[in-house]
Amino acid sequence: MVFVGGEAGAGKTSLIEALRARLPARTPFLYGACDPLEVPRPLAPLLDVAGGISEELRELVSSGSDRQTLFSALADALRTAQQPLLIVFEDVHWSDDATQDLLRFLGRRIETFKVTLVVTYRDDEVGTAHPVRRLLGDLARVSNVHRLHVPALSLAAVRDLIGDRGLDPEQVHARTGGNAYFVSEVIAVEGNGVPVKAGDAVLARAARLSPSARRVLELAALARHHVDVALLNELASPAAVDECCEAGLLLDRQGKLTFRHEIAREAIDASVGAGRRKSMHGELFRALEADRSHLADEPTPGPDEATNDMTQKAGQLAVLAFHAHEAGHHAAVLRYAVAAGRLALRLHAYREAWLQFTRALPHSRVLPPAERARLFEDHGRLGFVVDDIEGAAASRSEAAAMWQQAGDPEGQVRNLRQCGAMLMQLGRHEEAEAVLADAHKLADSLPQDSVELAAIYADKAWPDTSKGAPDKVWIDRTLVAASVSGHHEALAVAHVMNGYLHLLAGRVPAGRRELARAVSVAATSGREDLEADIKSDAAALLSVRLRYAAAEPFLEAAISLARDKDMDCTLNFATANKARAQFYLGRWDETAASATWILERPNASKVPRIRALTMLGLLRVRRGDPDADPLLDEALDEALKLSSVVVMVQVRAARAEAALSREDPDAALLEATADLQMALDDGTDYEVAQLGYLIWKAGGRPPDPMPRDNPFTWQVEGRPLQAGRRWRRLSLPYEQARALSETDDVDHMLEALRIFTELGATPARARTAERLRQLGARGIPRGPRPATQANPVGLTPREMQVLQLLASGMRNGEIAEQNHVSHRTVDNQVSAVLAKLEARSRGEAVAKAYRIGIIGGDVTADDVSRSTSAT
Amino acid sequence: MPRYLVERAFSEGLHIPMTDVGADICKGVVERNGDLGVTWIHSYVTEDKSRTYCVYDGPNAEAVRKVAANNGLPVDRIIKVFVLDPYFYH
């Protein structure tokens, strides 16, 4: 796998063409590209190449199979390919999330595939926060993933290209900055002898074409993605299309036309004036609509109906909606955007569906109330899914008004409830309560068999999930009503609430059984969004009881469903909770990755964002890293706007711990007591106990009585060992070590020291070591043991050991035996060692390792020949 | 971009030869740093080569730790610092 980076026009594509020309004649070459669309087509490059890999894969892709199935089918196909393949993915700086996941997936397994995968990207357009940058970081240490930078042309290279054309190489080089594409364009227009600005070179070249060929060029530029040759033939003339291809401005790739370079497309696109732009989009729209108008009239296939060309059809509808929008054909925008959105919804492409409905809404006044209500309701539902909560609340409110006009009180209730829930989540409690009161009042007039009743009861069971506990009476009513009406969501929610009641009462196994029941109701409902949400909720409630290890599998499942279906709200929420679980379970590097991921999401809503800020802030506190305060300050600012107990206690506890760590007990006391009353009123025993413990640590008086049967309470009461055992059972290493460090027993404190060291909890480690010294303990390990045997080529401790064994002349089989691992594992380790040492053979690797000094002793010719002979 | 002082302990000493190999090693570190927007400015190495104090620019402490892991380098402590020179107030 090779990532080819370079600025736009550096010559990445030319490099690939050159590579292709050197390959044996019949090497299969597959080409996929990402397009500069405002809504990237999901997995666009895979869509392009799937057919060339296998017929089965093509069908899977076009029928909108889920990501897991697709990825593993692709892996199988690449593993069992008849002959080596060359696959090119172009311009991945424009790729969608799914394509990046695909590349990550392939990169990690690339050694097992018979494929060379070349991936191009504009490295000047991927800043540090760009997802492609992260992809490169993730694959940085994978062997057989390489990076190639295509630099600007040197003066000598420009001179070579100019040859005897009588241009001044120095001037051309200076003007173009050595950009290969600009250089070639400048050389191509050299005939008139007038110096041009590099960017104008494209236009100058276009200006020499016949008027009809220029028109083709403009149409192709406005069409954006690869456009059918046949379509342009129809709009212009085949001769004009040929002229563009002959001039080298357009390329014909398997019946689709594309610009030789995106720079050229952008230049042409920008040169088309507003008026003409509109009318040309109109032309493209009419031509495309002529043979596709039936698409919008076909019924959207039901959930069990698989149609092979759905993905393609959705793409065509989206293109029609795009051109209609640009051309200002309002009725057509409504028609095609709604149809495209419905099909996208059926394919679970939620973000795309949401964008299409967003496009359609402003033109929806012409629809009858019921249809318009349905459009707003879908838009609201999707807005929640993609984490646009504000927009979703507004659409739900509009939908409720429309259902009222249409005379459908059930629809009205349904949307008012959702609107209320979203306002609640936005922290707009008063508005939310007013809307919910309306919903409940209206619900009283609904017939007894209404499906909405179960949902209303569920609301009443737990009016504000950010505080307090659910009410058993209303849960039971919900269960009955939901069983009668078959309301899956209410039924699953009722089981979740029941489970939580058990957990609160300390009946953990019973609680987990109820949560499992909720998950199975959701899983059999056929609604993947419900399944993801219920799993995420179950994990959140287990986390309230500090059962992070039990919560994690639910979180993983929710995240994978949510990522697969673009459910950003659930994805953000579950990922933030995963950051918290990883943090308490002691996997701090992973915490940093998850939390940073959330903080870089532009649209993450408040709760996940606050949680990510808090966990990353606390991580810095416990590691002794700088800049915890700005994160914890922002977390507090945001939390104050929400008034949620769960969020608030977590932020206050983190801030109190930060203050304790900088030895400011007064500040710690202020933080820990600030919202203690809120925790006492509406919080759980853990929340009260946690604050109580921090108050005690800061030298204040914890609440009396402290919650019973709680490890924090035991620590306050001077029973740290008992607490330590509980923390260990909950798998919270830092909490365990902290409890052990509060004993006066040297052995327990040494154990605490060991755990702190392993975690990288530098300040706590230093404090514990200091206390041990005061107690007169001997043999305190000095300083942290380096996590990896430091060496400058980046070998892990295991790889170092393999290298040592290689140096002693062992064969792979012997190494496998000695390390009790499989041959395959050793093969991988050895190739990782070779790659990192940039050595071609084991002998070379060993020799190099001695030379660099990462393995000790003097190298002898004998050593080298022994390890070489084992190759 | 904030600047950090990264303290590292090398129990067996840091050995980078004064050859092309050493140059490649340093270049490798620089490139892997670049993935996460981290820049290695320079380092101070104790005489016995058992500790280094490395001056880094980077977006945050987590990125500095991540590239250290990618490079197989230990991290003892990360301190955020500002530059002060004798003529700072002139």
Image (tube, coloured by chain):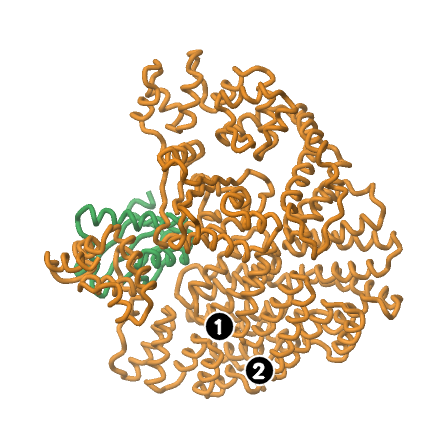
Chain colours: A orange, B green
Residue type, mark 1 in image: Asp
Q: Quadrant of residue A481?
A: bottom right
The residue beneath circle 2 is A703
Residue A814 seen in the figure = yes
In this picture, is A466 found above or below A34? below
Image coordinates for residue A844, horizontal then vertical, percent: 20, 53
Chain for numbered disc 2: A
User: Which of these two is toward me, A634 or A527?
Assistant: A527
Image coordinates for residue A206, horizontal then vertical, percent: 53, 19
* Left or right: B80 as drawn, with respect to A668: left
Q: Which mark is residue A666?
A: 1
Residue type, mark 2 in image: Pro
Image coordinates for residue A70, horizontal then vertical, percent: 54, 54
Q: Residue at x 68, y 51 (%)?
A: A345
Sequence-earlier tag: 2 or 1: 1
Residue A637 seen in the figure = no
Chain for numbered disc 1: A
